[in-house]
Image: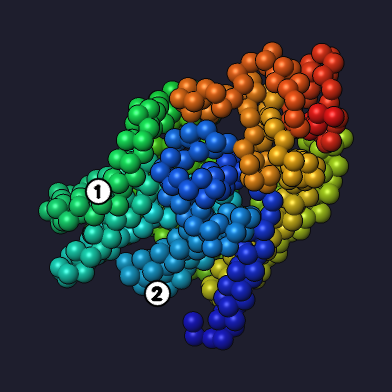
Amino acid sequence: MTTALPRVALAALALVALLVGLANLDRPLANPDEGRYSEISREMVASGDWVTPRLDAIKYFEKPPLQYWATAAAFEVFGTGEIPARLYVWFAGFATLVIVGFAAARLADPRTGLASVLVLAASPYFMALGGVVTLDMGLTLWTTATFFALLLAEHAVGRPREQRLWMLASWAAMALAVLSKGLVGIVFAGAAVFFVMVFSRGISILRRMHWGWGLAIFLAIAAPWFIAVSRANPEFARFFFIHEHFERFLTHEHRRVQPAWFFVPIVLVGFLAWLPALFAAIASAWRAPEVAGGRPLRVALAWSLFILAFFSASGSKLPTYVLPLFPALAYVVGRYVAHASCRSLSRSAWVFLALSIVLVGTASFLPDFTHDAWNQALYLEARPWAMVAAGALALGAVGSDLALARDRRWLAMASAAMGTVIALGGFGMAYDALTPRQSGLAVAAAMQPFLAANPRAYSVAYYDQTIPFYIRRPVTLVSYVDEFETGLAAEPGLAIARLDDFPAEWLRPGEALAIMQPRAFAQMKALGLPMQVLHEDPRRVLVRKP
């Protein structure tokens, strides 16, 4: 920075990003992921069992516990609520930005470091997921740390002590990636080593891996929980390592089937602000000359494409899976935009503006995509905020182009990032308007006056994962299995398997509440069960036994 204005712009961006990020932490939790992972952490605190994860009091082995532990610790310190539930994810996103900026500056120059941070901050997909409770941002943090620590170790080949420290840091980060989401942490680390060997045309990196200390650090961090949970739960190992990894990847059992190109538009829209620069950046990274430590730009590019190809080949696809490729690709794009001519970047800004205008138009038609009056009313309430968000992206694009026309590269990048950050605030407000559709908060509020009597609580042919979190207790599942198959096989008494068995259970003496899928409610009503309706919408019906 050689002038005051870019510094002021970047300081304003940092402040707005902080305020928007903190404001978005207070949103109601969404079903299913946010409710699921927050409730597992809440139940850890309530039960005192930090070895066996449980969801709705049922054993839940789909993912390792690092994020559960971090969120449970936040609950212990700050109490149970939406903000503590999102703190770890927010920290992971922030720490990833720091790692990318630091590593890019060390591998290239300070301009590239700053540009890489701004590219990532102007990536709406990455920034949005920094406020959503999924496990993918935590995995992204630790795979990014693994990858860049490896590159920094190669960059320090002539400095043995520094090289060793970075390599051991990479081993430690890989262990934390495994504790975040399983064996994929090892797969991605192995791919990074492979690409270093490919582009250095040799296997010398294998002699610099510090295998003895590295494996010791990896096992010391990753192994204890896997040993403890396997000893406490004999069914864990087969389910976690075979079902959750190989069967999930190779089959369509999880019913998350998408076409092979599914993640491509997600990545393209994810880099919206500098989308046209993306292809020029890829070409530039491929042509970049060898530097100390090999070809880090080529490695970053190949590693990002590997992650895209890896998840594209999987039989189970969710949009958030490709998040780990964004930081490395931001380094590739950041290196380009830090040094490309402002004229070439200006062409990119105009495409950004055109795409933003399309988003404004899309936001205006949101209510027309709904199927009933209830959803339409919610979308009508959300539409103004969605248009504000899309408009912020457009204004960020205009500001970026005007700055580039005056050869103000950093002001242009700050404008693009500012538009993204303000847009996230607008989308957050739009989400608040959709809360009755996305969250069980309203249902939990209707249950609250009756919970003091400690009634039996059922979830019939339906399960909203946010409701147990908000009522601070599990519910009994009725005619619902889905992801609970393994846990219920081990402890079948924790649920009611058949809908036909529910009427007798409902009529037992004592207070009772039930959240029902509307069709199940109609069936129970036809049987003449006594039910007082406390809440009803197209998704669920809450009833009380009079």
Looking at the rendered structure, the kind of residue marked 2 is Pro
Q: Say what secondary structure mark 1 lies in.
A: helix
x and y percentages locating residue 237 in the rendered image: 34, 31
Residue appearing at x 82%, y 19% in the figure: 529
x and y percentages locating residue 449 in the rendered image: 80, 45
Looking at the rendered structure, the kind of residue marked 1 is Leu
In the picture of the structure, the residue carrying the numbered disc 1 is 219
Q: From the viewer's perspective, is residue 178 above or below residue 506?
A: below
x and y percentages locating residue 355 in the rendered image: 66, 51
Q: Say what secondary structure mark 2 lies in.
A: helix
Calculate the distance from the C-alpha at mark 1 to the C-alpha at mark 2. Answer: 35 Å
Q: In this rendering, would 34 be left or right of 376?
A: left
In the picture of the structure, the residue carrying the numbered disc 2 is 110
Q: From the viewer's perspective, is residue 77 above or below residue 216?
A: below
Looking at this view, is 369 or 4 the one in front?
369
Q: In this rendering, would 241 be left or right of 394?
A: left
